[in-house]
Image: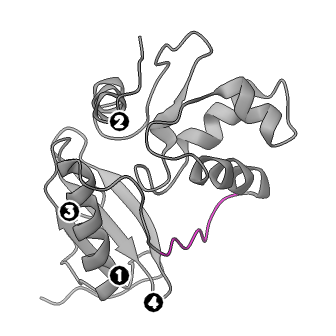
Amino acid sequence: MDSIPTALTPAHLLRLPSPIGRLELTADDEGILSLSIETDGQLPLDATPEEPSPVLQRAAEQLGEYFAGTRQTFDLPVHLTRGTEFQRSVWARLASLTFGDVISYGALGNDIGRPGSGRAIGGAVGANPVPIIIGCHRVLATSGQITGYSAGEGIPTKAWLLSHEGIAHR
């Protein structure tokens, strides 16, 4: 039986293996919409058939290179269609971080003109729809401690990504 497209069904969908679990990428005709990391063996759209696109194939190639250690930057169109202005400002700052960079929640708040907004910053970081490509794993407590991660298996996934980039953490 063919699936019936809905407003919640992305135009394009691709899944790929990775060292941190299966990844699920969605896109519209303009760019990447989301990247999900497998959690407890599940992906959000596991029941939806794949519908690859050139941008998703390019993303799969670049993610493969990232995990192999041969790519440190992504050259992909990201289309952030959801999120508040505040969330998008946090994601824009995260997008400016490069491989191996780290920032604290407090410094991130200061950088976007919202000092003292640690809890809200944490919520916006956790709501990032395209982890890895927009490196939300690069945010740590001022002490260098991992305080949480909303993708994949949580803290172990974040610890793997940080170690992969040579970022010290506790």
Q: Which mark is residue 8?
A: none
Instruction: Characterize the local packing of mark 2: few (<14), some (14-19) or many (20 or more) Cα atoms within 10 angstroms.
Output: some
**Which comes before the other along the chain, label 4 or label 2?**
4
Task: Name the kind of residue labelled 4 in the image.
Answer: Asp
Q: Which one is closest to the eye, mark 1 or mark 2?
A: 2
> Where is residue 122 drawn, in percent x and y?
63, 32
Disc 4 designates what residue? 29
Q: Please tell me whether mark 3 sits on a helix, a strand or a loop.
A: loop
Q: Main secondary structure of the magenta part?
A: loop
Mark 3 / mark 4, whichever is N-terminal = 4
Please name the residue that numbered disc 2 is placed on: 165
Where's the N terminus, which quadrant?
Answer: bottom left
Instruction: Tell me which numbered mark, 4 or 1, is placed earlier along the sequence.
Output: 4
Q: Which residues are magenta?
A: 77-83
Please name the residue shown 41% across and 63% down the image. Answer: 74
Q: Label 4's element?
A: loop
The residue beneath circle 1 is 55
Q: Give x and y (percent) for residue 138.
A: 49, 35
Name which of mark 1 and mark 2 comes first in the sequence: 1
Q: Is residue 16 above or below residue 107?
A: below
- Image quadrant holding the C terminus, namely top left
